[in-house]
Image: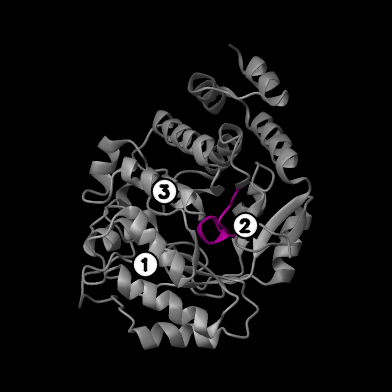
Amino acid sequence: MSVEQIADKLSRGERIDAVEAKLLWEQAPLWLLARLATEAKVQKSGDKVFYNKNFHLEPTNVCLFECRFCSYRRRKGEEGAWDYSMDEVLAQVEARKESGATEVHIVGGVHPERDIYYYADMIRRIKEIMPSICVKAFTAVELHYMIRKAGLSIVEGLQLLKDAGMESIPGGGAEIFDEKIRAELCPGKCSSAEWLEMHEEAHKLGFDSNATMLYGHVESIDHRIDHLMRLRDLQDRTGGLNAFIPLKFRSANNGMESLGETSVVDDMRTLAMSRLILDNVPHIKAYWVMYGKESAELALSFGADDIDGTIEDSTKIYSMAGAKDQRPRLTIAEIEKMCAAAGFRAVERDTHYNEL
């Protein structure tokens, strides 16, 4: 099958398989991918680009895992480590009580000493301060550890967090699903099957979630396609994924620094192909903190229809890995200007993509 035939198939709204995806990814001109991905984006969300008013809580960067790509994690007591007390975490929430934020995004290191009961209490106390805030919290990797540490089943653990007030799960920790690469990048972390199981069980309990893919390191295009196909299969089963976020590997201050970083062209091809393969996932997010504002704006012409949120200088994960914005913050006016420059309209949403 030729590139033109695959393009025609996509224009008719038909699903492509892994072989067709590889041919398109490697051989289609960039302008064609942009056109096809924009067509697919417009079918999903018209002229809208979504954002939300959010802030991040990162209770600790102390982590028992030693992922080679991570610039964030520290051992307890190591220079650059932080480990906020419950009161310090709640003070951060209190400081943003009048911010208008509709979402708090909680992720951090996998702390060796904390289990799910500690974090369920944190969620309950956050909701006491900001009753209407949506709590989107804990990657599947964090959940897997904290639930297992407490001796609970996945369903029991997730139900405990739901009862505490958690509504949604972020997409981190997916990295690349190929197990050989996963063993090389992040030994000891939950497996790809366990990551997928966590999200599937969460969807059955009424949570929605996001999904990610860390790309631009030692993986091949085949590995990226395999990753996307597994997510597409999950979505076919559950329908619980809100958005997919391709995460560009940033090389500063980690064990894979010598690899450098992939090009902006590769970023745009990856965004476009994510939109084309994941025909059943409503939204593709160009996470501006990771790409930088200029590339995030460009991404809106390659199938992305979400750029995340205002952030309010509340995350350090990408700044510690060398991202351009060392104190990430976007105003609503800046978001509207970015979207208008790409020919789209900025629309505020909540965590579940209800328009506000």
Can residue 251 be seen here? Answer: no
Callout 2, which amino acid? Ile
Q: Which mark is residue 231?
A: none
Tell which of 330 and 63 is nearer to you: 63
**Which quadrant holds residue 85?**
bottom left
Q: Is residue 288 magenta?
A: yes
The relative height of residue 250 versus residue 162 in the rendered view (above or below) is above
Is residue 158 rendered to the left or right of residue 242?
A: left
Q: Which residue is mark 2?
A: 307
Which of the image's four quarters has the C terminus? bottom right
Quadrant hosting residue 25: top right
Q: Secondary structure at mark 2?
A: strand
Marked residue nearer the N-terminal end (2 or 3): 3
The N terminus is located in which quarter? top right
Per the rendering, the mark at residue 108 is: 1
The image position of residue 120, as x and y in percent, is 38, 72
Residue 201 shows which numbered tag? 3
Residue type at mark 3? Answer: Glu
Write down the region rendered in magenta.
Answer: 284-294
Residue 310 or 261: which is nearer the viewer? 310
Q: Position of residue 214 (x, y in %)?
A: 42, 47
Question: Is residue 308 on the magenta stretch?
Answer: no
Name the residue: 63% across, 32% down. Answer: 30
> Height in image: 235 above or below 187?
above
Within the image, what quadrant is residue 147 found in? bottom left
In percent of width and height, residue 181 lies at 29, 38
Q: Is residue 165 above or below residue 295?
A: below
**Crowding near the residue tagged with mark 2, few <14, some 14–19, many ≥20 C-alpha atoms within 10 Å:** many
Distance, label 1 to label 3, CA atoms, is: 22 Å
